[in-house]
């Protein structure tokens, strides 16, 4: 027997030369696990279970819920929330919030409408100007966050308050009232409406084009999260900024990019708002930011960041859509809608927490 000094062993410890080496534990990423275990690790599992249960429930209590027109209405309402809930979920995975999303949608619609009307320009010019304005708002949120180091809650709350006043003040100053002028007779309106607010016929079902935008955003966001380095950066900065910066993640650029993504979705939603209704109420959008966040949380996103999925946020928006319209189809008092949503939010959060604990216990 020879006395050797090995890394990790106290100096002078005895170890037989012919000792049999112990097998190393296999890399966790290479271990094949059963399907139920893999499903337990998906952030959106709780939301999917809740969505299925809610669908079955309203299918049983509301006779009209399963009609093609009803399904179309549910999907449309869900898509108007889901377009914003998906980028908000990515932002939350990155560890940040945006309380200005609801009024930013209105700001986008107002910028497009008022520029087109006041400049008597082709409506597509207004659409382009609105894109630049909305992206500038998103950049402002991200830039202020990374430069001041203030919490995103404070930064975006300030933006929310400024935009709320700006929307009302500028609209009254320019148009003399709280609504914009009609632009339906202007050049380019019909083609812009086809892109942002048209109706597609699939068999006997009419579907709003917002559903296509919604599904496209889900697909792109999922690809970014799971197939690109940017997705790794998003999870990293949400898990811990200092640790992410230590391994070379561009934290500032990642966070600014996330806010730009939210702004881009707000631009899409704003253009739909404008071209679907022609005029815009300057006070709209207040309170919607909480619904977007709630949809992301129901879909499995953690408030602490570093965990979640775009699919989960989309399912969370679908749950909101089914609950909102299902109550109407069941002929219940709609005053109970907010109570129902609050209860559903708590139940979904508890279910997600239980699923995460079960998933961690299987490791």
Image (spheres, grey):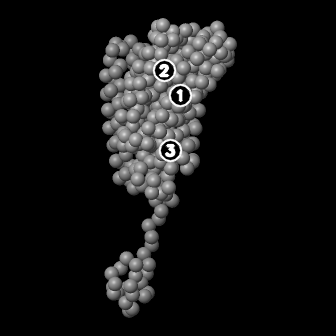
Residue 254's disc number:
3
Tell me if residue 111 comes above or below residue 293 in the rendering: above
Provide the secondary structure element on which disc 1 rests: helix
x, y percent for residue 176:
48, 7
State the residue in front, 28 or 131. Answer: 131
Question: In the rendered image, which residue does mark 1 sit on?
Answer: 134
Around disc 1, counting alpha carbons within 10 Å, would you say few (fewer than 14), some (14 to 19), or many (20 or more)? many
**What residue is at 42 percent from the left and 55 percent from the top?**
243
x, y percent for residue 24:
45, 70
CB under 8 Å between callouts 2 and 1? Answer: no
x, y percent for residue 106:
48, 20
**What residue is at 40 percent from the left and 50 percent from the top?**
240
**What residue is at 45 percent from the left and 57 percent from the top?**
246
Residue 106's disc number:
2
Residue at mark 3 to residue at mark 2: CA–CA distance: 26 Å
Labels 1 and 3: the sequence-earlier one = 1
Tell me if residue 272 comes above or below residue 347 in the rendering: above
Labels 3 and 2: the sequence-earlier one = 2
Tell me if residue 238 comes above or below residue 120 in the rendering: below
Provide the secondary structure element on which disc 3 rests: helix
Residue at mark 1 to residue at mark 3: CA–CA distance: 18 Å
Quadrant of the snapshot with the N terminus = bottom left
Q: Is residue 356 visible?
A: yes
State the residue in front, 246 or 350. Answer: 246
Q: Is residue 47 visible?
A: no
Residue at mark 2 to residue at mark 1: CA–CA distance: 10 Å
Quarter residue 43 falls in? top left
Quarter residue 218 falls in? top right
**Residue located farthest toward the front when viewing the structure as drawn:** 173
């Amino acid at each position: 027997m020879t006395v050797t000094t090995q890394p990790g062993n106290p100096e002078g410890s005895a170890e037989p030369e012919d000792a049999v080496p112990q097998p190393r534990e296999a890399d966790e990423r290479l271990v094949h696990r059963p399907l139920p275990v893999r499903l337990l690790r998906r952030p959106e599992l709780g939301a999917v279970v809740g969505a299925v249960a809610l669908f079955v429930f309203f299918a049983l209590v509301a006779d009209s819920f399963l009609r093609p027109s009803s399904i179309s209405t549910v999907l449309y309402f869900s898509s108007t929330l889901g377009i914003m809930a998906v980028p908000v979920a990515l932002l939350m995975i990155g560890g940040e919030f945006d309380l200005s999303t609801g009024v930013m949608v209105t700001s986008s619609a107002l910028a497009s409408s008022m520029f087109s009307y006041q400049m008597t320009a082709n409506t597509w010019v207004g659409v382009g100007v609105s894109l630049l304005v909305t992206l500038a708002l998103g950049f402002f949120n991200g830039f202020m966050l990374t430069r001041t180091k203030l919490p995103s809650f404070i930064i975006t709350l300030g933006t929310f308050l400024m935009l709320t006043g700006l929307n009302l003040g500028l609209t009254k100053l320019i148009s003399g009232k709280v609504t914009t002028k009609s632009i339906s007779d202007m050049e380019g309106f019909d083609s812009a409406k086809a892109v942002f607010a048209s109706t597609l016929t699939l068999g006997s079902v009419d579907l709003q084009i917002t559903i296509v935008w919604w599904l496209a955003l889900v697909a792109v966001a999922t690809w970014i999260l799971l197939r690109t380095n940017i997705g790794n950066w998003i999870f990293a900065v949400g898990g811990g900024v200092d640790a992410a910066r230590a391994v070379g993640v561009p934290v500032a650029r990642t966070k600014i990019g996330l806010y730009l993504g939210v702004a881009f979705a707000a631009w899409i939603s704003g253009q739909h708002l404008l071209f679907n209704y022609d005029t815009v109420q300057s006070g709209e959008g207040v309170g919607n930011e909480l619904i977007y966040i709630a949809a992301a949380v129901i879909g499995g996103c953690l408030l602490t960041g570093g965990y979640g999925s775009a699919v989960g946020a989309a399912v969370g928006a679908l749950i909101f859509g089914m609950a909102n319209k299902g109550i109407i189809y069941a002929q219940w008092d709609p005053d109970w809608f907010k109570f129902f949503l609050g209860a559903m939010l708590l139940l979904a959060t508890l279910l997600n927490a239980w699923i995460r604990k079960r998933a961690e216990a299987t490791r």
